Image (spheres, rainbow, N blue to C red):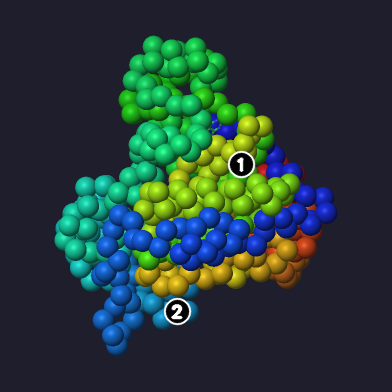
Amino acid sequence: MDTNKAQSASAAADGSAAVGGSGSVVSGSAATGGAAVGSSVVGESAVGASAPAGRPPIVGMIGAGQLARMTAGPAAELGIHFRVLAAAEDESAAQVTADVVLGDYRSPEDLAAFAAGCDVVTFDHEHVPRSLIEAMEVSGHAVRPSSRALHYTQDKQAMRERLASLGYRCPRFQAVASLDDVTDFALLTGWPVVLKAVSGGYDGRGVWICGDPEEASVVLGHGLQLLAEEYVAFERELAILVARSPAGQGAAYPVVQTVQRDGICREVLAPAPYLTPAGAAEAQRLGLDIAASLGVTGLLAVELFDTDEGLLVNELAMRPHNSGHWTIEGAVTSQFEQHLRAVLNLPLGSPSLAARCAVMVNVLGGEDPDLRSRLTHVMAADPGVKVHLYGKSVRPGRKIGHVTALGRDLEHTADRARRAATYLAWGTEDTGEH
Ligand SMILES: Nc1ncnc2c1ncn2[C@@H]1O[C@H](COP(=O)(O)OP(=O)(O)O)[C@@H](O)[C@H]1O
Ligand SMILES: [Mg+2]
């Protein structure tokens, strides 16, 4: 299914596109390149997240995918006791985390038992039912981000309505329940129309670009709650990643360009090329403002469409995000460390670039499951490339890892990262479409 007509990445020719590249940390009202985040606590209590003196704080993450796996390292470095709620012992994060609780994120009992032992609870995905998150809050647990904020990542209609009511620019949208609803909407926007599952979608699953009523009727036949959106012929996709602590401190990473294919993030260029300092500052301010408006604690990623008429908000995530994996090597503070700092109400770290540019390319599974021999080749071919593997079994198209290259020239750095990622996936260095 063609869910995505993402534009190809156009890396800067000279690599000097470091405009807007230094992230900004904003404390109270002292804005440096980003926007101020009020110092008041929004939407939740700041108590309950610090550990009693004499022992490390316990951060519990619900879900044990690659995001939790990549949080385990920074937790160890900061002396934080990291615990994950995993469905199985062989899940990505369960393989590397000392403290694994097996349980079901849809079970009230399992969640209550998990939360009871943690100083703060946070998430590796947005699929925990809202009522169960509220139940943890009612029981007095520090849950970050809160159920109120998370709602806007779990329900795309609620997110669109809330952002529109706050005055943020989004694609035109309409809840639809019938083919008539969709065709009425198309009278306003024209075809194609984008249909989206209101909840439960990710990596393009739950997004359909419908060229005509027939295609729309197939999607309606799935019986899901749907949102119709105008098809945005964007020039490119950008993302802004910010962190916000319960005390109201905020930090904004440099704006990045993301490239999606078939709805899956393929690569991320940091900082986004061809962005003016004013454009970068505007996106950073947008991210910090949305985080404050929605009372987000922890990380917030805002996916953006860059269009002729400016930036439109596509979607929100309140956890470490694929568009921020480059920060492990490419920023002074990785997004995983930043999320831990934010949910523990610790001072935030610098989000500034650690190199002129960074390029992250996802490794999607190919036909051959034997990564190890190809890994040796990649290590030998370019000792500067950093490889991250998620310990997942290889299936065609599945995200199994990523590579990051740092450099001075964006084009050259992207080329190195693409070569490594494609070689790992299928044993050839393909710097074109992948
Ligand atoms: N309204 C739209 N117009 C054009 N492309 C879109 C639109 N909405 C989504 N897309 C494309 O589909 C991708 C996935 O959509 P998104 O809403 O972010 O869903 P997911 O939750 O799967 O990430 C986007 O990154 C973008 O490439
Ligand atoms: Mg998305």
The answer to whether one can see residue 330 in this image is no
Secondary element under disc 2, as helix, strand or loop, is loop
Residue positioned most to the front: 29
Q: Is residue 115 visible?
A: yes
Circle 1 crowding by C-alpha within 10 Å: few under 14, some 14–19, many from 20: many
Asked if residue 225 lies left or right of residue 204, the reply is left
Residue 237 circle label: 1
Depicted 366 relative to depicted 46: above or below: above
Q: Residue at x 33, y 29 (%)?
A: 225
Q: Note whether ligand 1 is within 8 Å of mark 1.
A: yes
Q: Amino acid at mark 1?
A: Glu
Q: Judge whether 212 appears above or below 79 on screen.
A: above
| Frontmost residue, 357 versus 114 | 357
- Which one is in front, 298 or 88? 298
- Residue at image x 56%, y 42%? 304
Q: Position of residue 246 (x, y in %)?
A: 36, 63
Identify the residue at image location x=21%, y=47%. 131
On the picture, is 294 further left or further right than 230?
Answer: left
- Report helix, strand or loop for mark 1: strand
Q: Position of residue 377 (x, y in %)?
A: 71, 65
Q: Earlier in the sequence, mark 1 or mark 2?
A: 2
Numbered mark located on residue 416 in the image: none
Ligand 2 within 8 Å of disc 2? The answer is no
**With respect to residue 358, does 289 lie above or below?**
above
The answer for how far apart the CA atoms under marks 1 and 2 are is 34 Å
Q: Amino acid at mark 2?
A: Leu
* Residue 78: mark: 2
Question: How busy is the neighbourhood of tag 2: few (under 14 within 10 Å), some, or many (20 plus)?
Answer: few
Q: Position of residue 206 (x, y in %)?
A: 43, 34
Left or right of 72? Residue 154 is left
